[in-house]
Image (cartoon, grey):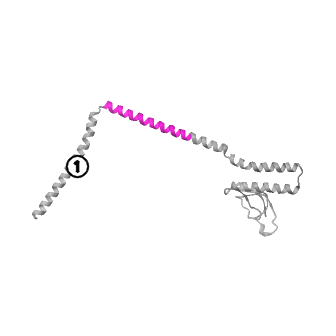
Amino acid sequence: MSKKNKKNQNDEAKAKQEEILEEENVQEQAQKPVKEEEADLDPQKKIEELKAQLEHEKKEYLFLMADFDNFRKRTLNEKAELIKNGAERAMRDLLPVIDDLERAMDAINKGGDLDSLKEGVDLIYNKFVKYLESQHVLAIDSTGKDFDTDIHEAVTTFPAPDPSMKGKVIDTTIKGYMINDKVLRHAKVVVGS
């Protein structure tokens, strides 16, 4: 081996030893303050500190629980208020239709023109249908369609006038309605047999 290689190896070995010694010193330094602090604190002081910390944590926990309880109560009150007054808007929007019906009844009682009364009732009906559509309530179109137990309720069966009407709705006795793709009222129908 050459002198340079030996020297490089010795230098590397010394550098590794120095690194190891530095790491040991750092570890000792880190452990000393903890040991000195523990030595400085007598057990009674340590207990008092832990009790104070525990009390602090208890108070924070109680505040958090009270906050959550208040949130829960507030949410329940808001839900109850929504349920209580949920139909308010719907009923307010129906009031003009009732006003129109009252005017029509007054005109009937006064013996008004039959054609104008019929036209007035048609206007009221159309106004009411538009209101229902604005609330996403739509009539179920049944007559001539296949009988579907999800949206129809068979009142009776009747012999079909022709073979193509078997299992189909021949007549709708009471219209059915859907709201947001959910059946609000099943259509009562006569089914061909």
The image quadrant that residue 147 belongs to is bottom right
Is there any visible trace of residue 87 in the rendered image?
Answer: no
On whether residue 48 falls in the magenta region, the answer is yes
Residue at disc 1, secondary structure: helix
Residue nearest the observer in this picture, 28 or 78: 78
Q: In this view, does 46 lie to the left or right of 82?
A: left
User: Percent x, y for residue 96?
Assistant: 75, 49
Q: Is residue 140 left or right of residue 161?
A: left
Residue nearest the observer in this picture, 115 or 181: 115
User: Percent x, y for residue 40?
Assistant: 27, 33
Quarter of the image containing the N terminus?
bottom left
Q: Is residue 25 left or right of residue 188?
A: left
User: Percent x, y for residue 80?
Assistant: 63, 42
On whether residue 13 falls in the magenta region, the answer is no
Quarter of the image containing the C terminus?
bottom right
| Residue pictured at 77% horizontal, 69% vertical | 164
* Residue sticking out furthest to the bottom: 163
Residue nearest the observer in this picture, 143 or 108: 108
User: Is 26 drawn above or below residue 36 in the view shown?
Assistant: below
User: Is 181 drawn above or below residue 83 in the view shown?
Assistant: below
> Which residue corresponds to mark 1?
23
* Residue sticking out furthest to the right: 111
Circle 1: residue type: Glu
| Residue pictured at 82% horizontal, 55% vertical | 120
User: Percent x, y for residue 87?
Assistant: 69, 46
Q: What stretch is highlighted in magenta?
A: 43-72
Is there any visible trace of residue 22 in the rendered image?
Answer: yes
| Residue pictured at 88% horizontal, 52% vertical | 112
The image quadrant that residue 4 belongs to is bottom left
| Residue pictured at 81% horizontal, 69% vertical | 162
